[in-house]
Structure formats: structure tokens, C-alpha cells
Amino acid sequence: MASDWHIINVDLDGAAWQQLLDAEPHSMFDTATWGRVLADGLGAEPAGWIVQQGTNPVCGLAGFTKRSLWARLFFANIPYGGLVGEVPDALPLASLFAAHAKTAGLTRVRLTGYPGRPLPTDGFHCHDSSTHVLELGGRTWDELWQGFKRNIRRDIRIAEKKGVTAVWCSDEDGYRAFYQLYLDSMRRNSAIPKYGWAFIDALRRHIGDGGHGGLFLAMKDDRAVAGVMVVDSGDTSFYLMGGSTSADLKHCPNDLLIGEAIKRAASMGKSRFDFLPSGPGDTALMQFKAKWGAREVPLRTLDLTAQPLRLALWQAAYRIAESAAVRPILQAWQTHRSNSRNN
């Protein structure tokens, strides 16, 4: 009976969630560690939902709630947030989520799929996207290097000839330099920075210091000119985010860093290197990822609206904020606020 199914809220640090992770395949983005990154870095409220039939845990998801204006949004999770565990055909997932969201006062629930972990779509509004994944297949760096296209090998050699070097960074000063590189990239792309210094510092403390990934910086003339943050999970290494100075792009520091990140993943015995999804319509970024031999992997994001009117008002405000007239103002304000906190 449908009434046998229900959702319980659990603490990601608690025994119930850990027991589910111990029993099912999962990623770093499903763990309490990643929850702490989001809590400290975004001011989010980490949460775990476990779907039970009677008293039997069947599947679950890790996520967080975040208030934006008058909307209270639930994300499961970023950058990936699919379900942990098998989803039986008889499970009325959308109706369960809708009822649970209304009880919790949520405006919208969003799930972003994980590569190879399908999501049921009945009752959800679906958005199709993709990520790019490079299959390492047990190859050494020398074998990968020989398989790269000629332009990749050329651009990495350009960086080396120009005196660009890649260093693995663990100190706070390096992460602060990386944050400035991220802001430079946002300005170059006329984009509002999504993350403040608090998020970068949370990555340093919980991911870097915790041995779950870290930061590569490209150095030229004793200056940081580009950076790449990677996160490790099981047999996969993820390219989480990057940044670079506009003036030094001609020296190909990003190519050098991606090469170093892939080399590191191969040396650790990882099976794949995941570039993470690109933004909608960002053809240049998708081409950059594909040129490394990464294959495009389809993803699906599911939305479930619990409060339609409140969501419509929030979306209208968001469209205004993203408009050509308002975006530069918000970008400058966000950068100023982030720099003030950084200092």
C-alpha cells in the first residue's frame, strides 16, 4: 500500500544515514563531510531524507535547504545529488516528496542526477543536461599523454616554455589567491560570483585538510595565474572549479593544470576524471572538456514545486537579477562584499 511509504529526516552525521551509505554505492557529495562544506561555505542547512517502507530503509538523498528571498529551496545536492540506493518501481517518489516538502515549508525540491545513477522521472519536471567524463582505464600518464590530441600537448608545452609551473597548495594564502582568480574569471565572463571566500575556505578545511582533494595553482614569475580545485570520491576525481587571470591565458595555464589534475588522478589509480556539468549553452567550456577525450554523459535534473505562486515570484526576481542591466551592479556588489570578508 502507498501508505506504507514515508520519508524521515535524518542527520548526515547520524547512524541512520551512515548505515545507508555503508550498504549502498555513494559519492563524496552524499556524505556529512560535504554537508559541512555547504554549511560553512554557503550557510546552508544540511539534511538527509530516507525513504522507508514500514520500518525498512529503501533509499535516501543528501541535500540542503537554503532560503533565497521569500523562497525556501531544497537541493539534493550540488554538484551532484541523486538518490542513494535502489528505487523500486512501486515507489511513489514524486507524491512522497511533494507531501514532505509541503510539511517542511519548502518552495521547491531539486535533484541533480549522478552519472550512471538514474533518477525516476514520473511526476517531476525534467531538465536534460550533461557532464564530461574522461575514462582513465588504468592508463599511466605517459599512455594518456600519447593519446591526447596534438593541440593539448602543444598547449601544455607552451605553458612550460613560458615558465608556468603547477604546485599543489595546502595553505590559506594559496586558497586566498585562488579565490581572487575565481573572481577574475567571473568578471571576465560577466557573471555574478556564486561563491564567496567562506566556500573556498570550507573547501580548504574539509576537503584539502581532510585528504579528499585539494588545489593546484599555476605559478608564473612568483604569481598565481590560474587554479583548479579537485575533489576525490571513490574511483573518480572531480574538477570542481577553477579560475585564472585574463592577461595570462595566452600562456595556457589552464591546460597545464588540467593535465596535472589528470596525471594526479591516474597516479592514484582513479578510473575516471569528471569535469562536472557545464552551464547551459556554454559551448566553449564544453569544447574545452571534450578536447581532452572526455565523453559527454547525459544527466537529468528533476524539479518538484511545492508552492507554485511563491516559486513564480522568486523566479521573476531571479530573472531581473540576471538581466543585462542589473547583472553588473550585482556582480560588483557581490565582489565588493566577498573582498571585504576576505580581508
Image (tube, rainbow, N blue to C red):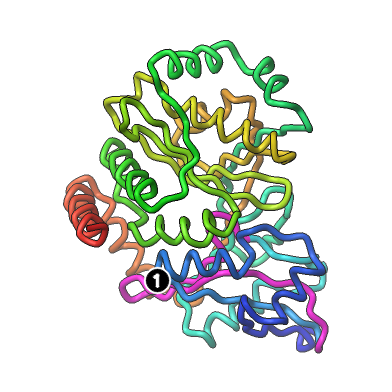
Between 51 and 236, the residue placed more toward the observer is 236
Residue 22 in the image, given as x and y percentages of width and height: 78, 69
Quick check: is 306 in the magenta stretch?
A: no
Image point (57%, 45%), residue name: 129
Q: Could you tell me which residue is drawn at 62 percent across and 36 percent down?
A: 264
Tell me which corner region of the image, top left, top right, bottom left or bottom right, holds residue 318: bottom left
Q: Amino acid at mark 1?
A: Gly
Residue 260's spot in the image, x, y percent? 56, 31
Q: Magenta span: helix, strand or loop, mainly?
A: strand
Q: Is residue 145 above or below residue 38?
A: above
Quarter of the image for residue 84 reads bottom right
Quarter of the picture containing the C terminus is bottom left
Give me the residue at 58% from left, 47% from top.
128
Query: At x 61% / y 60%, what residue is drawn?
Result: 29
Q: Secondary structure at mark 1?
A: loop
Direction from residue 101 to residue 137 in the image, left or right: right
Q: Is residue 335 above or below residue 249?
A: below
Q: Position of residue 187 (x, y in %)?
A: 26, 41
Position of residue 44 in the picture relative to residue 315 (left or right): right
The number of numbered badges drawn on the structure is 1
Label 1 crowd (10 A; few <14 / some 14-19 / many >=20): some
Magenta residue span: 55-81
Placement of the N terminus among the 4 image quadrants: bottom right
> In the figure, residue 83 lies in which quadrant?
bottom right
Which residue is identified by label 1? 43
Residue 185: horizontal and vertical position, in percent? 32, 39
Residue closer to the observer: 210 or 241: 210
Q: Is residue 202 left or right of residue 51?
A: left
Magenta stretch: includes residue 76: yes
Q: Is residue 194 above or below residue 123?
A: above
